[in-house]
Structure formats: structure tokens, C-alpha cells
Amino acid sequence: MEISTIAVIGAGTMGRGIAQVSATAGFHTRMHDVSRVALGRAVSEIEKNLRKGKDLGKITEEQWAAGQQMLETGTDLEELVSGADFVIEAAPEDARLKVEIFERCEAASPAHAVFASNTSSLAISELGAGLSDPSRLIGMHFFNPVHIMRLVEIVLSPATSPSTCAAAEAVALRMGKETVQVKEAPGFVTTRLNALIGNEAFWMLYEGLASARDIDKAVKLGLNHPMGPFELVDLVGLDTRLSILRFLHERLGEKFRPCPLLEQYVQEGRLGRKTGRGVYDY
Ligand SMILES: NC(=O)c1ccc[n+]([C@@H]2O[C@H](COP(=O)([O-])OP(=O)(O)OC[C@H]3O[C@@H](n4cnc5c(N)ncnc54)[C@H](O)[C@@H]3O)[C@@H](O)[C@H]2O)c1
């Protein structure tokens, strides 16, 4: 199947990044959000990234032109997905909301359309609960910032068909991404590992083993991670990390029990860079 039009649902941090790499890859890209403000912000953010990419020689003239010409936006979901061959959902991490979005997409899009969710932890089969054909649903877990991070984790539910998987692989490849395939499980590979490392770092800080700066330094210089676990959680948001850990704890057991220090920081409103204070002050 030839994929020429991609609809992206949600124009937040991830949706706008996905729309950007979709447009620069030459797909007709239709970005949807319930909020006009979010759409406006997304378009100016994409323009800023493209200008910077062009100035730094990271994107070609052709990609720059495609980024300008291939992107349209709208607040009417049904209209946006009506001609889409492929839909990538990047709405908030709320299972009920995603189930409803996919139901509406299935009713309004062509019969051949493939549906992908950018969820970072939820089970793909649960998100397909309202679909009459769940074989068309797959997970495509992009990373932040989407135009820089190279991986897409492709997540297969027991119902996902080989042709749906092939379509997702082809889309990721054309967007310039590398892929790994993972069977559906809470947190897949990356979210599960990252949550465990980040939580363990909080336990070390809680036990007074070392300072936050030294734990970050040890992980960067000794283990060759580009960022320390506390720098990373301040970027991701401590509240987001806590909700992922609670979910993994419920599904996978004791080793994911959130560290009390993380819970305390969230209660105190220390959510990371976005609130000016997380593990570090900004
Ligand atoms: N932020 C990350 O680092 C990251 C990384 C990988 C995956 N994810 C996943 O990507 C998804 C989106 O996360 P985000 O960080 O971009 O969130 P975000 O809050 O930045 O953006 C969500 C957007 O969805 C819009 N929205 C709300 N309800 C909607 C609806 N019914 N229909 C369409 N749009 C709607 C909001 O207006 C907002 O613009 C989540 O499932 C998240 O788990 C996030």
C-alpha cells in the first residue's frame, strides 16, 4: 500500500515533532488538536526547528521546502483523518481518551488506513478495545525531541497484522528513523528500563549514598549516558515519571515501587524544569 497522507492527532510536544518529521519526509501531513492555541504553537515551533536545521545544514533544501508545503492543521478530527492512509495518535496519556480517538478515526478514515499510538506505556490491545479491526493498530513510540532522536520502538499487540507492521516500519524508515520491534508489555523496553534506572537513582539520593550531581556525573562519565538520571527526570517531569512508575508498579510488581523521595518532590510541586525546580533549581 502506498502511504502518502499521514494524520497526526495531538499537537503537543510529541505530536508536533512527529508532524515535522512526517512533512520533511514528504508525506502530506495533517496535524489535529482540539486546541487552536496548541496548533498555532506547534506550527511556530516547527518553523523555528526547520529554520535552525536549515541554518545548521542539518536539513536539505528539499526537506525544508517539504516542511513548509506538506503541513496542514485542523480542529475537526473526522475531516482531518478522512483522507489519511496512516494515523499517528499523540494525545495525552489517557487510555479512555485514546480508545475514543481510535474509534472515531476508524469510523472516519479509509478502510485501508493504519493506526499507530505514540503511547509511552499503555497496552496497544487495550487502546484498540473499540476497533472493529484491531489488526490495523500498532504502537510507534517516538522519543523527545522527535526530529533529533533516532529510535522508534514499534510495539506489536497480539492482534497487529504483518501488513500493519510493514506499514509502520516503512513510515519510520522514510522519516529517517531506526526501529526495534517489541511485544506489547507495560513500558516496552525503553520506558521500563529508564523508569528503573531513574527510580534507583532516587533511592540512592534518599539513602544519602551520594549527591545528585555526583550520581549524575557517575552515570555520564562512568556509564557513558549522555545525561544523568536527575537531569533527565527534570526534563521529562517528575510527575510524569511518578505516574509511569505507579503504572509499572501496579502491572510488574515491587521492583517498580516509586521511591518516597520522588513522591515527596512531586507533592511539593518540584516537577522539573517546567516548574523551575525539580531535583535541581533552574
Ligand atoms: N513527552 C515525551 O517525552 C513523550 C515521549 C514519548 C511518548 N510520549 C507520549 O506521547 C503522547 C503525547 O505526549 P505529549 O508529551 O506530546 O503531551 P502534550 O501534553 O505535550 O500534548 C498533548 C496534546 O494533545 C492535545 N489533546 C488533548 N485532548 C485531545 C483530543 N481529544 N484530541 C486531540 N488532541 C488532544 C492537547 O491539546 C495537547 O496539545 C502521550 O501518550 C505520551 O505518553 C511522550
Image: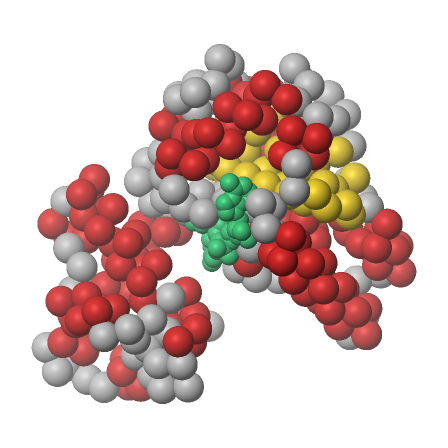
Query: What residue is rendered at 78% in x and 32% in y?
Result: 4
Against 268, residue 174 (above or below) is: above
For residue 107, above or below residue 138? above
Which picture quadrant has residue 265? bottom left
Q: Is residue 123 visible?
A: yes
Q: Quadrant of residue 245?
A: bottom left
> In the image, residue 183 lies at what x, y percent?
39, 32
* Quarter the N terminus occupies: top right
Note whether residue 149 is visible. no
Q: Relative to 265, does residue 114 appear above or below in the rendering?
A: above
Relative to residue 159, is residue 177 drawn left or right? right
Residue at the (32%, 36%) spot, across then down = 185
Q: Residue at x 19, y 53 (%)?
A: 256
Q: How many marks?
A: 0
Residue at horizontal 68 percent and vertical 19 percent from the top: 110
Coordinates of residue 254 in the picture (x, y in percent): 11, 49
Q: Answer with left or right where residue 204 lies relative to residue 120.
A: left
Residue 231 against residue 259 in the figure, above or below: below
Image quadrant in which the C terminus is located: bottom left
What percent of the width, then of the height, locates residue 47?
76, 64
Colouring method of the image: secondary structure
Residue 70 position within the rendered picture, expressed as x and y whole percent measured from the top left: 82, 46
Say left or right for 276 vs 173.
Answer: left
